[in-house]
């Protein structure tokens, strides 16, 4: 059983030289996520799943071959997106991935990536949750920055 003092929310923030709209498109289009996933956990996501609202569900294939459904629970176009992953056809076990974007100016955006497993109770997932650190989140931010900055011409 987890200790009550255990930190169950980790985050990383980075200022990226790209406009908020461009960055949000890379995050809100699941087919782009395997390109910048710093956890090396995603293989592919079908095209045409662009997230547009709370209640949307998009699917991913993990490197293990398992399918995941991601239930969007927070959404503000261009600013915020968060989802709860689950095994296909199952309720989410309680861990959340969140992306928050704050425009600094027209060509710079502060991006915060958070992993929150406060509500995760499924024992088999706790080891992986504990292993997901701010370093993993920063790796995703680094890959996202490299992708966005390389394609940020307007």
Image (tube, rainbow, N blue to C red):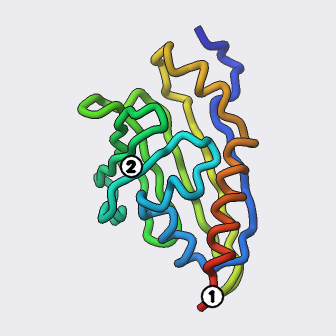
Q: Quadrant of the C terminus?
A: bottom right
Nearest to the eye among marks 1 and 2: give it.
1
Residue 84 in picture, x, y percent from top left: 42, 40
Query: In the image, which disc is placed on residue 137?
Result: none
Nearer to the camera, 60 or 25: 60
The residue wearing badge 2 is: 73
> Is residue 61 toward the left or the right of residue 131 in the image?
left
Residue 51 in picture, x, y percent from top left: 36, 62
Considering only vertical position in the picture, is 9 above or below 46?
above
| Image point (42%, 57%), residue name | 30
Marks 1 and 2: CB-CB under 8 Å? no
Q: Quadrant of the rendered structure where residue 40 is?
A: top right
Number of labels in the image equals 2
Q: Which residue lies most toward the left here? A: 89
Classify 10 Å Cα crowding around label 2: few (below 14), some (14-19), many (20 and above).
some
| Image point (64%, 48%), residue name | 38
Classify 10 Å Cα crowding around label 1: few (below 14), some (14-19), many (20 and above).
few
Q: Quadrant of the N terminus?
A: top right
Q: Quadrant of the rendered structure where residue 74 is?
A: bottom left
Considering only vertical position in the picture, is 17 above or below 43?
below
The residue wearing badge 1 is: 153
| Image point (73%, 56%), residue name | 13
Nearer to the camera, 104 or 129: 129
Residue 91 in picture, x, y percent from top left: 30, 30
Residue 5 in picture, x, y percent from top left: 71, 20
| Image point (65%, 33%), residue name | 132
> Is residue 46 toward the left or the right of residue 23 in the image?
left
Q: Secondary structure at mark 2?
A: strand
Disc on the earlier residue, 1 or 2: 2
């Amino acid at each position: 059983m987890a200790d009550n003092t255990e930190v169950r929310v980790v985050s990383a923030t980075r200022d990226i030289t790209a406009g908020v709209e461009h960055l949000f498109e890379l995050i809100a289009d699941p087919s782009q996520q395997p390109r910048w996933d710093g956890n090396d956990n995603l293989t592919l996501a079908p095209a045409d799943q662009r997230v547009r609202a709370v209640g949307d569900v998009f699917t991913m294939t993990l490197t293990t071959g398992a399918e995941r459904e991601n239930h969007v629970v927070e959404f503000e176009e261009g600013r915020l997106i968060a989802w709860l992953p689950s095994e296909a056809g199952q309720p989410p076990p309680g861990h959340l991935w969140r992306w928050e974007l704050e425009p600094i100016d027209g060509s710079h955006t502060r991006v915060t990536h958070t992993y929150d497993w406060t509500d995760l109770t499924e024992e088999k997932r706790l080891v992986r949750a504990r292993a997901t650190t701010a370093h993993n989140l920063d790796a995703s931010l680094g890959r996202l920055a490299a992708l966005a900055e390389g394609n940020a011409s307007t």
